[in-house]
């Protein structure tokens, strides 16, 4: 198995496509926003490049409606079956994306004992960040607040997860934990007893990062400008016309949020672009922070 990850705007998909030829591979996406249908331009789905590779199988793109919640738990369940199928056909699974949360749970398993409560999540997804915060400010849940930093406190998915865990505590904790999908240890080949992919070791685990911050900022600015020219604003208008809302999980995404604020006349177009760029830069920094904790990633620096 080959894994290609790293910061945003580093050319991960291009290398992954080259490796499909070299290693007789099939692509598996692990970008948490490219799983959504109709979210094409702003999420950076490189469809034109992919279409250049005739008869190439690609997996886990465009599988979820923008108004549906799609967790790492659901991702892992689907991805493990795809990997097994690719292996049976004698081909190489090539995973590509920047959502390390998905990848971490696929490779090393889940480290929590409270399983997802999808019925509760469906209800909570309809609430605003402010409403979720008020739920956590309840007297019974005050103990969770000190554990949350500023980013957590303003992230709807993390708020929902906290409420989910606290709700489980009230109804009684579920014993046990989710097993690792690939392994129970962090060895480079990710092998372990009970590994469902015993003949599929990870023989390439590449991570891309920018050598310096200025290059990262330049790349992100250039990419945002390109996506605006490709029709990013029109894409958002189209999604809203289809009946999707800014509170839908898919649209709570960098780029979409800022453009929706512009279309609602809350900010100017220039402010929306600036906020979009800033959010992308902050996201790239967070990506690197999480990924650097994985000792198995072999880093390649982008100049």
Image (spheres, grey):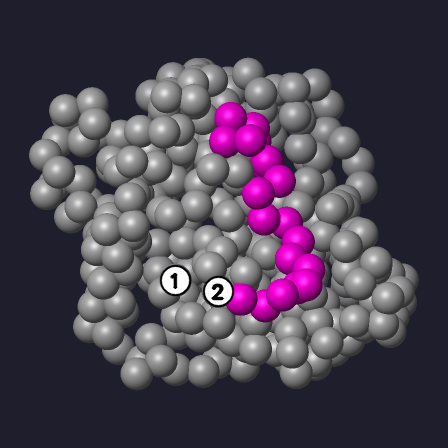
> Mark 2 packing: few (<14 Cα in 10 Å), some, or many (20+)?
few
Q: What element carries label 2?
A: helix
In the image shown, does 183 or 271 lie closer to the viewer? 271
Q: Give the dominant element type of the magenta stretch: helix, strand or loop.
A: loop
Q: State the extent of the magenta-drawn residues as a range.
A: 52-71
Asked whether, in this view, residue 93 is left or right of residue 104, the answer is: right
Asked whether, in this view, residue 85 is left or right of residue 210, the answer is: right
User: Toward which corner of the image does residue 296 lie, by quadrant?
Assistant: bottom right
Asked if 42 appears above or below 209 in the picture, the reply is: above
- State which quarter of the image contains the C terminus: bottom left
**Label ID, residue 49:** 2
Q: Gap in Å between the C-alphas at discs 1 and 2?
A: 17 Å
**Label ID, residue 8:** 1
Asked whether, in this view, residue 171 is left or right of residue 260, the answer is: right
In the image shown, does 197 or 62 lie closer to the viewer? 62
User: Toward which corner of the image does residue 218 lie, by quadrant?
Assistant: bottom left
């Amino acid at each position: 198995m080959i894994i290609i990850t790293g910061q945003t705007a580093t050319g991960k998909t291009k290398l992954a496509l080259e490796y499909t030829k070299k290693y007789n591979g099939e692509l598996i996406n692990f970008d948490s926003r490219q799983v959504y249908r109709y979210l094409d331009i702003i999420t950076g789905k490189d469809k034109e490049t992919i279409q250049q590779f005739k008869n190439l199988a690609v997996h886990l793109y465009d599988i979820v409606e923008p108004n549906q919640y799609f967790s790492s738990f659901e991702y892992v369940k689907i991805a493990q079956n795809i990997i097994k199928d690719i292996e049976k056909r004698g081909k190489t699974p090539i995973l590509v994306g920047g959502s390390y949360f998905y990848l971490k749970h696929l490779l090393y398993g889940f480290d929590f004992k409270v399983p997802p409560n999808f019925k509760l999540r469906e209800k909570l997804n309809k609430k605003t960040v402010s409403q979720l915060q008020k739920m956590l400010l309840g007297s019974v849940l005050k103990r969770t607040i000190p554990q949350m930093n500023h980013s957590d406190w303003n992230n709807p998915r993390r708020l929902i997860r906290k409420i989910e865990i606290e709700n489980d505590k009230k109804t009684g904790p579920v014993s046990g934990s989710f097993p690792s999908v690939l392994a129970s240890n962090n060895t480079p080949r990710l092998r372990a007893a009970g590994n469902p992919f015993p003949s599929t070791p990870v023989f390439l685990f590449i991570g891309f990062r920018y050598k310096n911050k200025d290059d990262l900022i330049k790349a992100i600015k250039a990419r945002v400008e390109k996506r605006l020219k490709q029709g990013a604003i029109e894409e958002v208008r189209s999604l809203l016309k289809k009946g999707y809302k800014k509170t839908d999980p898919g649209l709570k995404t960098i780029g979409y949020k800022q453009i929706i604020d512009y279309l609602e006349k809350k900010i100017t177009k220039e402010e929306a672009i600036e906020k979009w760029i800033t959010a992308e830069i902050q996201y790239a920094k967070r990506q690197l922070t999480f990924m650097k904790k994985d000792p198995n990633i072999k880093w390649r620096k982008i100049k």
